[in-house]
Image (tube, rainbow, N blue to C red):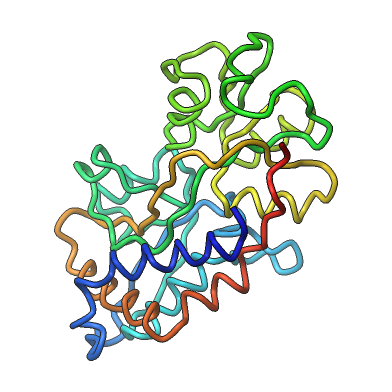
Amino acid sequence: MSSKTFLTRRLFALAVALASCAAGAQALPDLGGRKVVAVTENAFPPLNMLDPRTGKGVGWEYDCFNEVARRLHLVVDWRVSSWDVMIESIRSGQFDVGMDGISVTDERRSQVDFSTPYMRAPMLMLVRADETRFRDPASFRANAKLLAGAQPGTTGFYATGRELLGTPSTSPRIKLFETYGATVQALRAGDVDVVLSDTTGASANLAHFPGMFKIVGAPLPGEDYGFILKKGSPLKAPIDAALASMVKDGTIARLDSKWLKPLPPASK
């Protein structure tokens, strides 16, 4: 899938998903300088990461939510949390809003509220550049010696078992790592042979490690990402309206151009 096609499909999906908010996009609420505690992991580039020059958090989600806050007159207090406790920390009210490329699922909807999705991305097979033993899920499954890396509790973890291996995610062929970045480092070191990654993560790693990785096979089923909030949060409707206004005026497209690098064609 070309980067242009991917972007077009993403923006189309966003436009459809945000259509219900369009009426509110004309006159956004002013929340009067309310403080909002926002949490992320700083381990999922280019959505969120630490700038090595400044030590500060940067990325697509930072820019997006800071713009949401500007439009709603919110003051953001940024915090950092590990992925494995993020949903629970939002559910319990420890933080107001969370983000980490969090896929919208029915199970998660039972625990937290999601904003309107701000991004849709397919899952891709990220492998080392010299990989020749497999080119798609079927040929990966056929070689029992091959291993996949995944971060537990993520949709990529479940997709690794379901879409890649066709087995439960308890498969011994899935090696678990604490962060997405650690799965990529394991792939680079040869400890695993494939990592399922969304388009944003794959593009970031291809750009950061030129000549180290490549994409093989066709994209696997995509995911919608949204900000998470405590059930019944009064922030949901204003955030949805701000996101709708950002789609309408092209801000989301500009964030894509800034942070999302074009992907090369998948290797055959």
Q: Does residue 66 sit above or below 147 in this rendering? A: below
The residue most toward the left is 232
Q: Does residue 125 sit above or below 8 in this rendering? A: above
Q: Is residue 21 left or right of residue 98?
A: left
User: In x, y percent, where is residue 183?
Assistant: 64, 34
User: In x, y percent, where is residue 216?
Assistant: 67, 37
Residue at the image point whose x is 62% and y is 67% from the top: 259
Q: Does residue 60 sit above or below 102 in this rendering? A: below
Q: Does residue 124 sit above or below 27 in this rendering? A: above
Q: Is residue 5 left or right of residue 33?
A: right
Q: Is residue 186 left or right of residue 99?
A: right
Residue at the image point whose x is 67% and y is 55% from the top: 263
Q: Nearer the viewer, residue 189 or 199?
A: 199
Residue at the image point whose x is 28% and y is 64% from the top: 17
User: In x, y percent, where is residue 264?
Assistant: 72, 53
In which quadrant will I find the C terminus? top right
Q: Nearer the viewer, residue 181 or 34?
A: 181
Q: Quadrant of residue 19?
A: bottom left
The residue most toward the front is 268
User: In x, y percent, where is residue 152?
Assistant: 47, 30
Q: How many marks?
A: 0
Residue at the image point whose x is 54% and y is 66% from the top: 60
